[in-house]
Image (cartoon, rainbow, N blue to C red):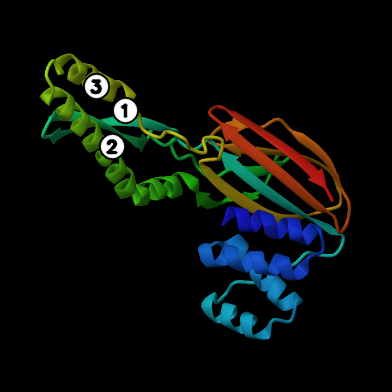
Amino acid sequence: GYVFYVSAVIRELLNDENGAYIDYKKAAELHPDHPVIRADVLRWAERLGMTEDLARYRSAWPGVLARSIPPSSAEVILFFEEEFLPFKQEATLWIPLPSGWTAIALPVLASPPSVWPPPVIWEGNEALGRAEPLTDLTALAARALQERMPAIATRQIARAVAKGTAVEVANRQKGGEWAALLLSLYNLISERADLRSWTSLPARTSIWRGTVPLGEYTFRVEQGGVTSPELRLTVAPGSRVILWGYRTGRRASLHGVTF
């Protein structure tokens, strides 16, 4: 959902109205209860004259208003990312084979980062709004690993059986005790889980979208007592201010550009 929303905003900046509307709808399919996405879907359905879509969305989302931009105002969009996906670590599981006990290595996710309150965007001493959580990539990564685990375990067990068979064959041969022992040691040493993962992705994402009058602004973002340095921008009527904030541990940062 976060990817589709970012793509929709980029398409807006490129004046690809149909593409933006499609991506907003895809984000809404994944997050139908998200207030920010709902307002954008209704805005574009009205703008593009999608009467059937508009009727369906208004029926499904009673009371939700289409996003509007007052005259002599500019739009501010905040994309906020926090922490990183937990890395994978190795867990050893011992299984019995005809040749004896052997170990298989399986990947498991490390403990996920703790959940913090939603970030707040500030302008000077005024809170403009609270970003709405959008995507929990940690949960998605855990579900993806869970779905792949049967295949991973089957593959690892098949490898263990093949290694165990080699040990058993070596043990049956005359003078093969040392070969069987070396094979067993090699099997234990070479058993490794696949720990490749997207550790550079954020653990969670949030978005906020609002409007401000023209002028000079000093933006900052705060989450759980951690505040980013201030960002000074000049806002012109009809422009869009794209802000990207992130937090890792006790450090937060905020970057932005005006279109």
- The span from disc 2 to disc 1 (Cα, nearest Å) is 9 Å
Tag 3 and tag 2, C-beta contact below 8 Å:
no
Please give the name of the residue rendered at 29% of the width and 49% of the height, measured from the top-left corner: 150
Mark 2 element type? helix
Q: Provide the residue designation for mark 3.
A: 183
208 above or below 112?
A: below
Residue 124 in picture, x, y percent from top left = 74, 39
Residue 74 left/right relative to 133: right
Residue 37, by quadrant, is: bottom right
Residue 83 percent location from the top left of the image = 53, 35
Q: Which residue is mark 2?
A: 159
Image height of 2 relative to 86, above or below: below
- Which residue was labeled with disc 1? 191
| 119 over 194 or under it: above or below | below
Q: Secondary structure at mark 3?
A: helix
Q: Residues within 10 Å of mark 3 (few under 14, many from 20)?
A: some
The reply to whether residue 149 is visible in this rendering is yes
| Along the line of sight, the residue nearer the viewer: 244 or 120 | 244
Quarter placement of the N terminus: bottom right
**Residue under the image location 89 percent in, 52 percent down:** 236
Which residue is at a point 72% across and 44% down the rendered structure image? 243
Evaluate if marks 2 and 1 touch, with contact meaning CB atoms under 8 Å apart. yes
Amino acid under disc 1:
Glu
**Mark 3 or mark 1: which is in front?**
3
Determine the CA span between mark 3 and mark 2: 13 Å
Q: Amino acid type of disc 2?
A: Arg
Element type where label 1 sits in the image:
loop
Side of 136 relative to 48 (left or right)? left
